[in-house]
Image: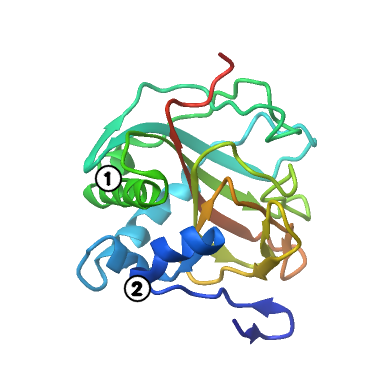
Amino acid sequence: MRAVGSFLMTPPLTPAAEVDAALAARGYAVVDAAQLGMLLEALPGVAERALAQWSAGWSRLPPDQYLRDGGRYRQRRHGSFVIDGAQVTLAPHRAHWQPVEYNALHGGIERWFQPLESGLVGDAMWLRLLAMLGERASALRGAQTWYCEAHQFRIDTAGGIGRPTPEGAHRDGVDLVAVMLVARSGVKGGETRVFDADGPSGQRFTMIAPGTMLLLDDARVIHETTPIQPLEPQRIGHRDTLVVTLRAGAFQGPG
């Protein structure tokens, strides 16, 4: 990990071949776009081109109507999938729900976000991405069916500040969490922080390059991202991410 400019620390990258071992040993791993491509078993540049094509969809995200801090800085879409080995099936559209134990700000309510666009969920590389994450979860917990939720987020600075994790440092109540940076434009801040859930050690860094992905064992670590602000006054910046969670047994729900 090294400093970039005065404040930013680059992520501690993990080679693709060592991701499963890193998740088992310390509860997290970070890969860049090239190593992500290797995990996807894609030819060089294919994963990067797919991400570039997907990124236009982040400009079409509708506002998040459920923010309880009064903010208007977040846009998002949501989709659910069932992953069984290499088979990825789109589940019927459903509400996103978390217990208050994991999300004190937005837990306990059904949040009906607009679904992911059909062009994304039908993309071959998208399906491969979800299947690959299922492989990582199975390496961590044992082979089984995974209940997956995918969230497109855009956090902007139209109001002067945007909060990627308004609930603060948290766990999600799942088995595996993946956070991929899609774009970062005209912002400062947005530092990622990962801490042991039961200890003092932690890691902080800033994801700068599109295609950088953080993988988290949700039982082992808590995570957050600090607020973003515009780099230049009067110019709105944004930070786009894809967050994917995988859970054994069933989707989270009020039942």
Query: In x, y percent, where is residue 68?
Result: 76, 32
Q: Residue at x 46, y 26 (%)?
A: 251
**Residue 231 higher or lower than 123, as above or below:** below
Q: Is residue 132 left or right of residue 141?
A: left
Callout 2 amino acid = Ala
**Residue 64 higher or lower than 42, as above or below:** above
Front-most of 163 and 61?
163
Q: Which residue does the numbered mark 1 point to in the structure image?
A: 127
Front-most of 99 and 220?
220
The answer to whether residue 188 shows anywhere in this view is no
Residue 134: name its quadrant. Answer: top left
The answer to whether residue 24 shows anywhere in this view is yes
**Residue 29 higher or lower than 156, as above or below:** below
Badge 2 or badge 1: first in the primary sequence? 2
Could you tell me which quadrant the N terminus lies in? bottom right
Q: Residue at x 52, y 26 (%)?
A: 252
Front-most of 52 and 80?
80
Query: In x, y percent, where is residue 64?
Result: 62, 35
Residue 254: name its quadrant. Answer: top right
Callout 1 amino acid = Leu
Q: Which residue does the numbered mark 2 point to in the structure image?
A: 34
Density class for disc 2 (Cα within 10 Å; few <14, some 14-19, many ≥20) is many
Q: Is residue 167 left or right of residue 119?
A: right
**Residue 87 higher or lower than 131, as above or below:** above
Q: Secondary structure at mark 1?
A: helix
Q: How was this image coloured?
A: rainbow
Query: In x, y percent, where is residue 169?
Result: 72, 49
Could you tell me which quadrant the C terminus lies in? top right
Find the distance from the CA under tag 2 to the CA under tag 1: 18 Å
